[in-house]
Image (cartoon, helix red, strand yellow):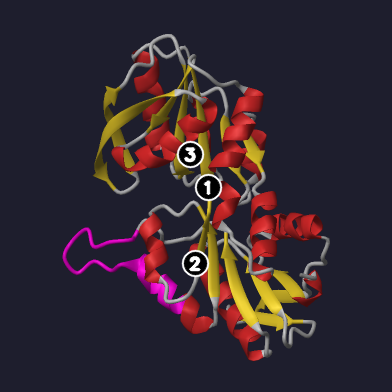
Amino acid sequence: MSLSNLKIFAGNSTKNLATQVTSLLGVSLGQSQVNSFADGETQVEIKESVRGKDVFIIHSTCSPVNQNYIELFIMLDALKRASSASVTAVIPYYGYARQDRKVAPRAPISAKCMADLLTTAGADRVVSVDLHAAQIQGFFNCPFDHLFATPTLARAFKENVGMGSDIVTVSPDAGGVERARAFAKRIDSSLAIIDKRRSGANEAKAMHLIGDVTGKTAVIVDDMIDTAGTLTQAVDSLLKNGAKRVFAVATHPVLSGPAISRIHESRLEKVFVSDTIPLSDAAMASGKIQVISVAPVIAEAIKRIHDHDSVSSLFD
């Protein structure tokens, strides 16, 4: 199918990623402007016609999370009201994903709240990369395409570090075993798990290692790195248990608070991340963080959605 009926716009959070996607597809980035009024309210201007078009908005809801969500809601509303045929929200990093269930009495399920707001604002379909919890797809009353960065990151790891029996893939907690197993399969490595217990929000303590890492190169695989507390404690645990080298792979470089200094001061050799969230200048200057773009995956997914082809077969 021709891409002449396709329009791709970008919010302010991931314009570089959106530019790469449009370049790969051979289309131009839609003309829009997102500013603020004097009182701080968000102002969106769509500067070209989208009547009858299949429209995609590429916009991560990363920090500042609330501001980026508001921008996305208002862009969705503007494009829906402009008589587009369909509007797809491509959210490489889905903010609030960690609030996916009630963990205490009277607690909100904020991931579900965001899903409701996105569809109310005008999203006909949502696309995201490596959700923190896959069941978030079920929070949406519209089609949802879940993309995976694992094949891209595993390929980069093989090219830069290696593969095989000398490497062990490590899940930093029990909840991430499925993700780590998928990565281990692609680099033909063994698997280990770190049992951890949280003492509070954004704080975790590595407690026990399940599996053998002695004399091996360990790669810790997770969906995101936030404050890097879990990550750096896992590094210490692996080295104490005999690992000779430690790397990390994560899709989303949230990198809040002391994350960059913790990574820099740790014995991690390198951290491979994707570009679902743009790195700060400090992160880029750290020397330990290497960015692997998921633009080809997103571009191919957009093309397949536009052509009404299978998206899941991308990862067969």
* Closer to viewer: mark 1 or mark 2: 2
Q: CA distance from mark 3 to mark 1?
A: 13 Å
Q: Which residues lie in the magenta part?
A: 99-117
Provide the secondary structure element on which disc 3 rests: helix
Provide the secondary structure element on which disc 2 rests: strand
Q: CA distance from mark 2 to mark 3?
A: 31 Å
- The amino acid type, in three-letter code, at marker 1 is His
Q: CA distance from mark 1 to mark 2?
A: 19 Å
Question: Vertically, is 5 above or below 68?
Answer: below
Residue 137 spot, x, y in % from top left? 42, 64
> What is the number of callouts on the image?
3
Residue 262 in view of the camera = no
Mark 2 is surrounded, within 10 Å at the Cα level, by few (under 14), some (14 to 19) or many (20 or more) other residues, namely: some
The residue labelled by disc 1 is: 252
Q: Is residue 295 left or right of residue 225?
A: right
The residue labelled by disc 3 is: 259
Question: Vertically, is 55 above or below 182?
Answer: below
Residue 112 spot, x, y in % from top left? 36, 70
